[in-house]
Amino acid sequence: MRTLFKNIKELIQVREAGLDFVSGEAMNDLPTIKDAYLLVEDGLIKDFGSMTECPNVEADKVVDATGKMILPTWCDSHTHLVYAGNRESEFVDKIKGLSYHEIAAKGGGILNSAKKLQETSEDDLYEQTKVRLDEIIALGTGAVEIKSGYGLTEASELKMLRVIKRLKENYKLPIKATFLGAHAVPTEYKDDKAGYLNMLVEKLMPKIAEEGLAEFVDIFCEEGYFSVADTEFIMEAGKKHGLISKIHVNQFTSIGGVQAGVKHEALSVDHLEEMKDEDIEALKGSKTMPVALPGCSFFLSIPYTPGRKMIDAGLPLALATDYNPGSSPSGNMNFAVSAACIKMKLTPEEAINAATINGAYAMGLQGTVGSITVGKEANLILTKPINSYNFIPYSFGANQIESVYIKGHSIV
C-alpha cells in the first residue's frame, strides 16, 4: 500500500534518524518543510521533501493536502486508560472545596476506582477501555502508555494488564503497558504496607514477567502513599524482572523521588508539579525524561509543572494527559499542548516537541514514532486548513484535526 500526500502547506517535525529527544534551547527548534510531499509505503514513512522534488511514483492513494499541515501523531506517555465507571461524584466534592487527600480519606480516590474495577469483568473492562482508546486516537494520539494500578489485588492487577495486552493485539498503534500495583495501599493492607509491597514483588512481578504483560514498572512516590525507600525497593525489584521504571513523583511534595528515579535510571519521572532547584539539578545530564501532566493541574487546581524554568535550565520535557477518572478525566493531547503554552509558558515549538519526539522517548518508542523520519511508522495528523501550527495550541478547546493516520491508514 502506497499513499502520497501532496501540496502539504507545512510538514512539521522533520528529523533525521538517530535523534532520541531534544533538550533546553533545542526544544524551541521545530524543523519543517513548506509546500511539501510525504510518501508512505506499507505503513512506514518512505520519503518526503519539497513539492519541487516530488517523485513521479504510482500510488494507491493520493491525498491533496492543500492549505493543510501534517505532523506526527501525539505520543501520550502517561495514562490510566483502563478503569471502570467514573468518579463524577468526586468532581462535585472538589467543587465544594474538598481536597484530593480529603476525598481519599472518605473512601474516594484510587480506592474507589479499585473497588469498581474489582467488581467489573475483564470483557466489560476491555469494552469500556476501547471507547476511551478510540476517543484519544480521534484526537490525534498515535502512541500511548497505559498503567494498571486500579486493581490493587493480584487478580485485578493481572486483569488490567491482560486488558492492555488485548488492546495491543487489536489496535495498530504502539501501546506500552506499565505495572502500577503500588498506586495506593489497599484497605486490607492498611497496617501492612511492607506486606503489600512484598506481595507485588514476590507474587505479581514473576507472573507479569512470565506472561509478558508489562514493559514498565511505576509507583506513586508521595507523602501518604509510598516513600522514597518504597520507590527504590520497587524499582530494584522491577529491574530483576526486566521492568524499566517510570515513576510518579513530586505531584504534591518534593521528597527525593526525582533523585531516586535518576539513580535507578528511570526512563521518566512524571508529574513534577512541585520542583525544587535540587530536583532540576538532579535531572541535568541524565537520560531520565521529565514528564508534565497539565490536565491534572487544571482539574485539581494545583500548580503546573515549571516547564519554562526546566527548559531554560537545559532539561528536556515531555507532555502527557494523565487520563484517569479522578484527577485528569481527559485524554485530549491537544489540550495538554495548549495548557503547556498558556499555563507553563512553553512556546508552540517546545510544546509540540514535548508532545511528539520527547513523548515517544518517554515510552522507549523514539525509533518508532514521534517525528517525520524515514523508516518510522506513518502515524500522522492531517490538520484542517490553518494559518500556522501556532493555531493548534492557540485555539484551545477546538479540534483542528481533519484526519488521523495510523501506519498510513486513515482512522478518522
Image (tube, rainbow, N blue to C red):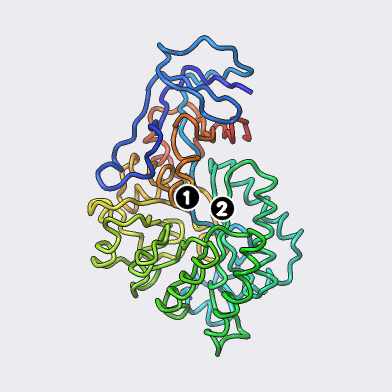
State the image quarter where residue 301 is shown.
bottom left
* First reached walking from the N terminus: tag 2 or tag 1: 2
Q: In the rendering, at what x and y percent does residue 3 appear?
A: 58, 21
Query: Depth check: 235 or 164 in front?
Result: 235
Q: CA distance from mark 2 to mark 1?
A: 9 Å
**How packed is label 2: few (under 14 Cα within 10 Å), some, or many (20 or more)?**
many
Query: Depth check: 235 or 191 in front?
Result: 235
Q: In the rendering, at what x and y percent does residue 52 appear?
A: 40, 11
Q: In the rendering, at what x and y percent does residue 58 appear?
A: 59, 12
* Residue at x-position 60% and y-position 21%: 2
**How packed is label 1: few (under 14 Cα within 10 Å), some, or many (20 or more)?**
some
**Which residue type carries mark 2?**
Lys
Where does label 1 land, which residue?
Answer: 364
Position of 200 with respect to 351 (left or right) is right
**Which residue type carries mark 1?**
Gly
Q: Is disc 2 in contact with disc 1, using a CB cutoff of under 8 Å?
A: yes
* Residue at x-position 46% and y-position 19%: 37
Residue placed furthest toward the top: 56
Where does label 2 land, which residue?
Answer: 176
